[in-house]
Amino acid sequence: MSSTDAVLYDHPGPKAKARNLVLTIVFGIGVAALLYWVYSRFDEKGQWAGNLWEPFTRASTWSDYILPGLLETLKAAAVAMVLSLVFGIVFAVGRLSDHWWVRVPAGVVVEFFRAVPLLLLMFFIFFGVPFLTEQPMSIFWAVVLGLTLYNGSVLAEAFRAGVHSVPKGQSEAAYAIGMRKGQVMSNILIPQAARAMLPVIVSQLVVLVKDTALGYIISYGETIQLGVNNLSANFGNVVQAAIVAAIIYIIINSALTAFAGWLSRRTRRKGRAPRASGADLEQRTIEPGLGGGGGTL
Amino acid sequence: MDVFSDPANRDVYITGFLWILKLTLAGGVGALVLGVLLAAMRVSPVPVLRGFGTAWVNIFRNTPLTLIIFFCYFGLFSTLGLSLADDIDLNNFWLGVVGLSVYTAAFVCEAIRSGINTVPPGQAEAARAIGMSFRQTLTIIVLPQAGRAVIAPLGSILIALCKNSTIVGTIGLMESSNAMKDLINANGDAVIPIFLVFAGTFAVVLIPTGYAFGWLANRLAVKR
């Protein structure tokens, strides 16, 4: 509940209370009607039949399809996260370089990979690169490399924003005691930037977890591929499997979002986080990105 | 660049990007309308409306778009028999628009809500003091100011939407990612030019769009 939210309307008087009640009932009935319509539509098509839902109560369904898929999702997400952090730091430092021949190419790479759809990138790596190397491309690496290039570029911008948010006095003091540029960057600026941007970094992980789902399109055996496609091929329950998969994603990502929120509150409370550029940064720290393409940070 | 001197290949390229353009426009309009409605719900005095908005945002923001598009096709269309057009391409297009809209609306809603938070509370208090209702306060006083504050985030969302529309290719629409895949498979000797043309088109259009929104946001910002 924000400050403005709370003052948009008065404490309800008798008239407003009556109106709110009417609205509640009308909208409640509307939602109930919608849910009933969905329910009856499902019913009509026999989607509530026990045999479509029953597989999810069997241990073998989980151990054969859903959990292996989830494991692959998390594996790709974990490897891509580590690689994109490295990519992000390297290119953020590159873009902040004093030498134009480092700064310009780093900028071009970051801007390019942020602008290209991730799916296009994965298709190129998976279908195109084998023509160049004359060796088959591993699906896992196609997914991970695509995720790394895209999320790494987004993280590079996050780190750069973080470095800019460190008060100028910090680097001036560091130069004053005789540190070189590299030392200032690695000992003073990057640690503080990483800390200021920690919630953004975690939010980007939500994007990354969601984006592993793109691996399904090039048939990487992740949650949708195994848990929805293969599972429903055996039991004929696409809708049910998709609902279960969606719930799994929602749980994982809500947990990560909550973690990001906790981190941002925690860093704020300590009062040591560098003063970043106000509301702008704050908004980024709370909202996880869009995924599949993400926003421009 | 020999690949694109063949008119058939040029057609594939143009068709792909036309679909992307249509998806972006239709999805953007849908997401904007839905998103503003959801944002209004989330700040309204009625708890049921607030709960509905919150549930929408949490469900759709945390589900991969791939899964939502998948569900639109296999759930809404194949299983439940919801058909949106007779033509197969057009049907897939509208299913894609539905998926993109419900997903993106969650982000539009959050952007507008954070925009509402940038409006000083005094504005809403003053509006209430002169006797404006919730609807008047929101539509006359708060939303216009919030709208100018959210131009930059809405720009990012539009750019992401454009990139996300490639995912509609999952359900068989010949948008540019599928077009690129086909061209690569048919012309193995020219994968780099093909990739550079497709990726370059996105980059050439979207990078300036991002800067344009940044410039616009600065220009239209409510100076406080």
Image (tube, coloured by chain):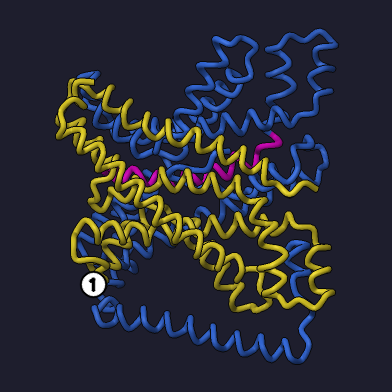
User: Tag count in the figure?
Assistant: 1
- Residue A83: percent from the left, percent from the top? 48, 29
Mark 1 residue type: Gly
Range of residues picked out in magenta: A195-221
Colour of chain B, in one word, is yellow
Magenta stretch containing residue A201, yes or no? yes
Q: Quadrant of the N terminus of chain A?
A: bottom right
Which residue is drawn at the image coordinates 30% and 78% (left, top)? A42
Q: Observer-nearest residue: B96 or B151?
A: B151
Using the image, determine if residue A155 lies above or below residue A234: above
For residue A71, above or below residue B197: below
Colour seen for chain A: blue
- Determine the main secondary structure of the stretch shown in magenta: helix
Quarter of the picture containing the C terminus of chain A is top right
Parent chain of label 1: B
Report the front residue among B216 and A213.
B216
Q: Residue at x 84, y 17 (%)?
A: A173
Q: Quadrant of residue A80?
A: top left
Label 1: few (<14), some (14–19) or many (≥20) C-alpha neighbours in 10 Å: few
Q: Residue at x 68, y 12 (%)?
A: A182
x 71%, y 36%: residue = A196
Q: Where in the figure is residue B172, as x and y percent of width and height?
A: 22, 51
Q: Is residue A231 above or below residue A43?
A: above
Query: In this image, A153 relative to A22: left or right?
Result: left
Q: Would you say A271 lies left or right of A51 here?
A: right
| Nearer to the camera, A283 or A204 | A283
Give the labeled residue for mark 1.
Answer: B81
